[in-house]
Amino acid sequence: MITRSSEQVTRFVIARRGDCAVVRRFINDEEVVMPVKKAPKKAQSFKTMPAGTAVSWHYRSAIGHGTVTGVHKHGTTAANTMYSIKQHDHHPGEPAVVYHSGKALTRTAK
């Protein structure tokens, strides 16, 4: 980007270095130092359901029952983390292990 005002030419150059963007500013072809702050990284502050937790879920007009066997894919919250669940009452032709998000699961008594 180049901006011009009376006898002063300002030029901005944006580049990426690692995980932050670096903006270089030039006035009349002389570099002006601009401080750049990195965004702090968020720590994962949620707990996932432990393996062996009895759960149920709704699927269409039925209710499924099963046991959490582990985390299939970590999300950003417990609600959008995908869990592997071993079904207790699956029918022939259905998979024995299914995957559901934490939002769809309800903890049940064993």
Image (tube, rainbow, N blue to C red):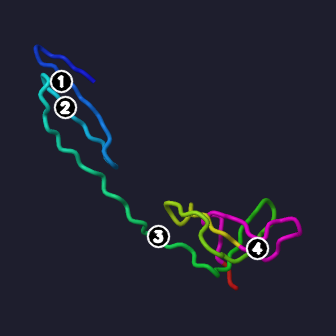
Q: Is residue 91 magenta?
A: yes
User: Do residues under tags 2 and 1 come within 8 Å of each other at their CB atoms?
Assistant: yes
Secondary structure of the residue carrying numbered label 4: strand
- The residue that label 2 is drawn on is 25
- Check disc 1 and give the amino acid type: Thr
Q: Amino acid at mark 2?
A: Arg
Name which of mark 2 and mark 1 comes first in the sequence: 1
Q: Is residue 13 left or right of residue 54?
A: left
Tag 3 residue: 46
Pointer 4 residue: 87
Classify mark 2: residues with Cα within 10 Å, few (<14), some (14-19) or many (20+): some
Distance CA(mark 1)–CA(mark 3): 46 Å
In-front residue for pair 64/1? 1
The mark nearer the N terminus, 1 or 4, is 1
What range is drawn magenta here?
86-107
Q: CA distance from mark 4 to mark 3?
A: 25 Å
Residue 40 quadrant: bottom left
Q: Which residue is mark 1?
A: 10
Q: Is residue 64 above or below residue 80?
A: below
Residue shown at 58%/78% (left/top)?
50
Contact, mark 2 vs mark 3 (Cβ under 8 Å): no
The span from disc 2 to disc 1 (Cα, nearest Å) is: 7 Å
- Mark 3: which secondary structure? loop
Q: Is label 1 in a helix, a strand or a loop?
A: strand
